[in-house]
Image (cartoon, grey):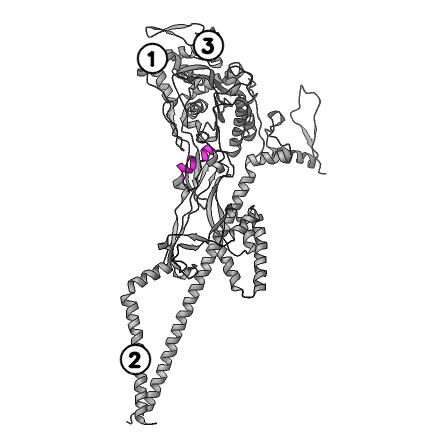
Amino acid sequence: MSKGFATNRLSLLAVGVVMCFMTVAVRLVYLQAVDRDELLRFVDKARRQIVVEHARRGAILDARGNLLATSRSELTVAVDPWALVEYLEIEKRPERRAQRAAEETAKHARLAELLGLPVAAVEQAFVPAMRAIKPEDDTRDGQVDGKVKDRWVKLCEGVDEPTFDRITALNIRGVTHERVYRRVYPGGALAAHVIGYLNREGTAVAGAEHKLDLYLKGQDGWIESEKDGARRELAQFRSREVPAQDGDDVVLTIDSVVQQIVENELKNIAATFQPQFATIIASDPMTGAILGMANYPTFDLNAYNKAPLAAQRNYAVTDIIEPGSVFKIVAAGAALNEGLVTPQSTFDCGITTIDYEGRTIKLPKEDEPFGMLSVAGIVAHSSNRGAAQLAMRLGDERFYEYARRYGFGETTAFALGGEVRGILEPPAKWDGLTISRMPMGHSVAATPLQVHMAMSAVANGGVLLRPQIIKEIRDSNGALVRRFGPEKRAQVLKPSTAATLAQLLTGVVREGTAKGFDIPGFEVAGKTGTTQILVDGKYSTTHHVASFVGFFPASRPEVVLSVIVDDGHVPTGGTAYGRVVAAPAFKHIAEQLIQYLDIKPVLPNPGRFLAMQGGAR
Amino acid sequence: MKPPPAHAFVNRLIGLTLVLLIFSGSLGLGAVWMRQEISQAANRGRLLEVKMADVERRLDEVNAQVAAAVNPDALLRQNQVMRLGLLSPREIQVVRVGESPELRLAAKRNREVFNVATASISDEANPPAFHVLTTALR
């Protein structure tokens, strides 16, 4: 071999190597400079991902910590039939492939059983099919024919986690899923109007769900990272991470058991009297905390989409009624509070007309004839003429002022909203008869909650409180975020007047319009109400709003209870008076609440001093 | 002074190059090992997060089931289905104890233990100024 040949070979090799390097360099320049932006976009799109971490919505609990609303994961199970085809195609031996196919078919029957579907429906889902798409979008399978493999055939929605675990254990080829969070209401219809619900789109529609959405919903987080070819996250490439902040839990003042007692009674009322609507409210008079609030008709929160809109209304705050004789607490309380009368002051309730401010006014009718009645008798027997005379003693302005102080004509500031103000016109807009009709609860309209809170003011020593429905807000770790205490709105009566009026109201069940509905030892104080309903502009004689609003024990009230029944029909015929329709329900609920809330009876005063001796140190 | 031979310098250069190669190789391998460890730790963390989310999900599921099982309506239904006949008590059935049950039980136990007996005269109109108590341990 000559030396020149060797030199040429080395030169050729060197040129070859240089050429290779040049090629690599040119390619690098091409990739790094010319195509850089496009390639970066591609890589970014292919590898980078932003995963949204959904915050868990807070729960709604009752005052004792029982779950009223919570979030639960549910799965939508679907089938990718092509995955099964590809799995079988991997196996080249026909007999082994047939064996695999048989094994999978056997699993499909078990899958159908778990999902509660016919086997044929499941088998049909596993038949591979093509799906039509827009040709311009058809870049997935390399053939631009406007068709792609259908890899999502939905089998079943709303599958729970335990069932899905059993499906996963079967290891069926081609079964896929999507996990979604759904709101569940373990109590079904329990406190439906108070809790409200989330619709399928996740929008809070009504009640606490809607009003407290800001607390409940939390804040979604997100993770910016990269993914591999199988779309799995490459956690080591996480560049930014904002953790999700779970929603706060909302604790209501509602007590599930009280709510259940109230709702059961509403069912009885509905079954017996077939009313248009009915409302029962129970609360603590000292704090204004609502223990139970229920309406008829109602609906199941888990099936809200099947409920008519009328059933979704919280009648306790959205609808107004004429309060009827319950409104007599305004005239009686005001006259006592102003010192114009005492419980023993008497009025002639047999007269039909009376002179008032230079005019002769016709007094309203009575349900039964009365003669001379004391103020105590007027309250107990619900004398319309007596109440009118009490209001006349006060005069238009003062009577109106007291009606306002009781909370009529303005919203109660109910935290869940949706309430109306009711109707209470100022004296300037009154006609000549209003001063004689309003004291008996006509010419005025109020929501059941307004009537309830007015009675609550009598029970708690004359203080008008804001109704409390939210007890507290807790974060996802259980730490207290905010507590809601009693809120005083007005001092309606002096405490001594309120106590006197409370004692007068015990006469209603002892000897008055609700005689026989007393609970011995528990001093039930209350007021019946029966109002004719306006039908086509006239007061109907066959349609009534019946109510009984009261509290017990009168000397140390622990529960205020309102039963209001709109247009109930007495099965045996006759007028749907408050004592017929509402008072029995009041008594039945009260008897149950006494046991559940451990309300102690009021010991009779023996009229002498009791010497007590204590010994324990 | 005699200069060092050229091949000794070359040897030293080769040696240094080798050391440099080993050092940089070690650094490179170390970096790769470290990245691998970071990757594994990150993935372990991610798996733990997934596992925690799964546990929380299952906890929510169980909580929802428990809440549905113990809500008053469900319990009333169970009462009917199982024919337990459970009813809330009526006031007439309730005996309210005004005194402290602990003190009452303690007094009863003391009476049993010390076998307390009292001696006094029978003339109730003129009671004595004091009672004579005798006790005996059992």
Mark found first going from the N terminus, 3 or 2: 2
* Quadrant showing the N terminus of chain A: bottom left
Q: How crowded is mark 3: few (under 14 residues within 10 Å), some or many (20 or more)?
A: some
Where does the image place residue B19, in percent across and percent down from the top left?
37, 80
Q: Tag on residue A568?
A: none
* Residue appearing at x 38%, y 73% in the figure: B27
The chain letter under disc 3 is A
Instruction: Tell me, yes or no, whether the highlighted magenta stretch contains residue A215.
Output: no
The amino acid type of the residue labelled 3 equals Glu
* Quadrant showing the C terminus of chain A: top right
Q: Which residue lies furthest to the left in this view?
A: A34
Q: Can residue A590 be seen in this view?
A: no
Mark found first going from the N terminus, 3 or 1: 3
Mark 1 — residue?
A431
Query: Where is B133 relative to A343, above or below?
Result: below
Mark 2–mark 1 Cα distance, whole angstroms, equals 111 Å
Mark 2 — residue?
A18
